[in-house]
Image: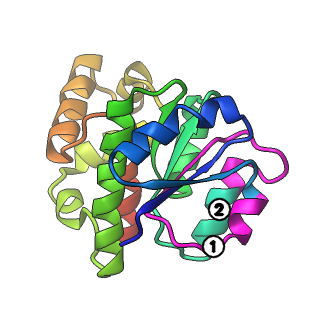
Amino acid sequence: MPTSIAVIDPDESARLPLRPVFVKVGLSVWEFEDGESYLRHTEPHLGLFTELRLPGKAGIDVLAALQQRRHPLPVAVLTAHADVPTAVEAMKRGAIDVLEHPCDPGKLLAVVERMHALYALHRHGLPLHRHIMQSLSAREIEVLERVFAGRMNKQIADDLGVTSKTVEFHRANLMRKCSATTMAELLRIAVLGKACR
C-alpha cells in the first residue's frame, strides 16, 4: 500500500499546515500547485486532497479526469470555497469528503483512515455499501435522493407531502443505517450505493 498523500493547492500557506499532520502518521507528502501537474504525475498515492479553485484545470476537472480513467484513488476536497452545489458535484465526481480550510487535524486523519480502507477495498475489487443501500425503505431512498440534490428539510417535506419532522426522522434513520456522521459522508454512500446496484 502506498505511504504517501498527494495535495493539490496553489497556496503554499494552505499546504504548509498539512505536512506535519500527515508526516506524524508516517505519510510522505507530494505537493502540486495545479491539476495538470498532478495528472502528469505517475507515483502511486494512498489518496489525494485537492482544492477546488486551481490555475488551469479546476479541482472538479481533476476529479472528472480521474473518474474517466476509472482511477481507484480516494480523493477528498479540501477547499476554502465550498458550497452545497459544488460539494454535491464533487461527490458525483468521486470525492469521498468535502472539507473546509482551516481543517481540524483530527478530521484530516479521519479522512486518511477512510482512504486506507477504501484503497484496500478498491484493490480487492469489493463493492461498497450495497447491503446498506438494500436496507433502505422506499421513503428513505426518496429522502436520500432529495438530500443528494441539495434540497433542505422544508423543501423535501413539500416534495413528499409530509411534515419537516417526518423528514428529520427519515434523515436520522439514514445517518444511522449508513453509519454516516456527516452529510458529506452520507452523500458519498449514496453515490457508491447507486454505482453498486
Say which amino acid is labelled 2: Ala
Q: Is mark 2 on a helix, strand or loop?
A: helix
Residue 69: name its quadrant.
bottom right
Residue 91 in the figure: left or right of residue 178: right
Depicted 180 relative to depicted 92: above or below: above
**Towards the viewer: 104 or 192:** 104
Q: Please determine whether, in this image, residue 149 is positioned above or below residue 41.
A: above
Residue 69 among those drawn in magenta? no
Q: Is residue 110 visible?
A: yes
Real-space CA distance between mark 1 and mark 2, rounded to the nearest whole angstrom: 6 Å
> Residue at the location (24% across, 58% down)?
133
Q: In this view, does 107 lie above or below 75?
A: above
Residue stretch rendered in magenta on the structure: 36-61
* Residue wearing tag 1: 68
Amino acid at dot 1: Gln
Residue behind mark 2:
64
- Is disc 1 in contact with disc 2, using a CB cutoff of under 8 Å? yes
Name the residue located 52 percent from the left edge and 24 percent from the top edge.
102
